Amino acid sequence: MDTRGEEVHVEKTEARAGATPNVVRYVLLVSLVLAIAAMSAIWIFGAVKAPDDTGGAADTREAVQRGDVDPQSQPGVQSPEPAAGKAGS
């Protein structure tokens, strides 16, 4: 500690009353890596366990076959014949 007139000058360690070990950055880094690993594992496990005939074109084809949607309104799954009940529209 150094006194100059009425001003008191103190070193960083004295003002903080201790040392700064910089542990916070390691805690943040480890928690970030663990969060990314956990989310990736959930995503990969879900993709591996999902049936092959779900999602995307398979769901659209199934909806068209049930007559729930008009195949001409579905991008990527076009049919030359109109959907049942939609003829003449």
Image: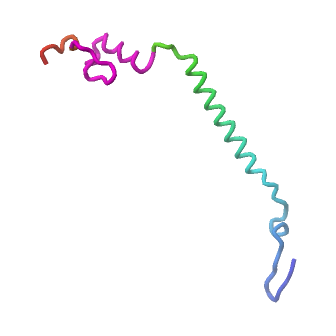
Residue at point 36%, 18% (across, down): 60
User: In which image quadrant can residue 15 be found?
Assistant: bottom right
Q: Is residue 9 above or below residue 89?
A: below
Say how many tags the image has: 0
Percent x, y for residue 56?
41, 21
Q: Is residue 15 above or below residue 19?
A: below
Percent x, y for residue 71?
27, 18
Q: Quadrant of the N terminus?
A: bottom right
Question: Relative to the observer, which residue lies in front, 69 or 72?
Answer: 72
Residue at point 85%, 69% (across, down): 14
**Magenta run includes residue 73:** yes
Q: Give the farthest residue toward the left.
A: 88
Q: On the picture, is 16 further left or further right than 41?
A: right
Q: Give the farthest residue toward the front.
A: 80
Q: Where are the magenta residues, as a range?
A: 54-81
Residue at point 75%, 47% (across, down): 26
Q: Give the farthest residue toward the right.
A: 1
